[in-house]
Image (cartoon, rainbow, N blue to C red):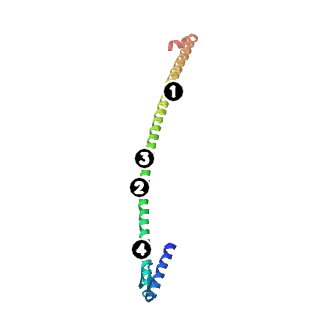
Amino acid sequence: MHLRSIVLLLTVLAIAALAALNWSALTTPSLVSLGLVSFEAPLGLMMLALTALLGIFFVAYVLSLQGSVLFEARRHTRELQAQRELADKAEASRFTELRTFLEAQHRQAHSAVLARLDSLEARLAARAEESDNTTAAYVGQLEQQLRTHNPVVSHRV
């Protein structure tokens, strides 16, 4: 319990105890003046009733205030939920855009790599063919030299 609730409860208990212990004094009739009119009535009982009525009004006020605060809290919660949903949708949209951008970048890089591989493959094939031609020329030259210097080898081939 909060300190205010404990103090309020102790005050109500003190009023109830004083009223119970002094009931005869509270119900003793006395002359009561309302300004224009005077009459005899139990002044203590009237004061006790007015105190109870004031307490009831305060409780009703606190309950209505608490109800309005709860209503506002619910409204704020709904607004926050709507804002959170909008933020989530915006974030999902950004993620979708990022994914699309990354996929396009990936496709572009993939195409560049494939083009580079094709270029390297063509150059490698050209170099291999050039190497084959060079090797064939060297072999032909060696055969030619062998034929001219050694006529026996030329018959065997």
Res 29 → quadrant: bottom left
Query: Along the line of sight, which residue is nearer the eye, 148 or 8?
Result: 8
The mark that comes first in sequence, 4 or 1, is 4
What residue would you read off at disc 3? Answer: 89
What residue would you read off at disc 4? Answer: 56
Callout 3 secondary element = helix
Q: Is residue 53 above or below residue 42?
A: above
Q: Distance between the Cα atoms at labels 4 and 1?
A: 93 Å
Amino acid carrying mark 1 in the image: Leu
Marks 2 and 1 close (CB-CB < 8 Å): no
Marks 4 and 2 close (CB-CB < 8 Å): no
User: Can you tell which of label 2 and label 1 is closer to the viewer?
Assistant: 2
The mark that comes first in sequence, 4 or 2, is 4
Q: Is residue 112 above or below residue 9?
A: above
What residue would you read off at disc 2? Answer: 78
On residue 120, the disc is 1
User: Can you tell which of label 1 and label 3 is closer to the viewer?
Assistant: 3
Q: Position of residue 78 (x, y in %)?
A: 41, 55
The mark that comes first in sequence, 3 or 2, is 2
Q: Distance between the Cα atoms at labels 2 and 1?
A: 62 Å
Amino acid carrying mark 2 in the image: Arg
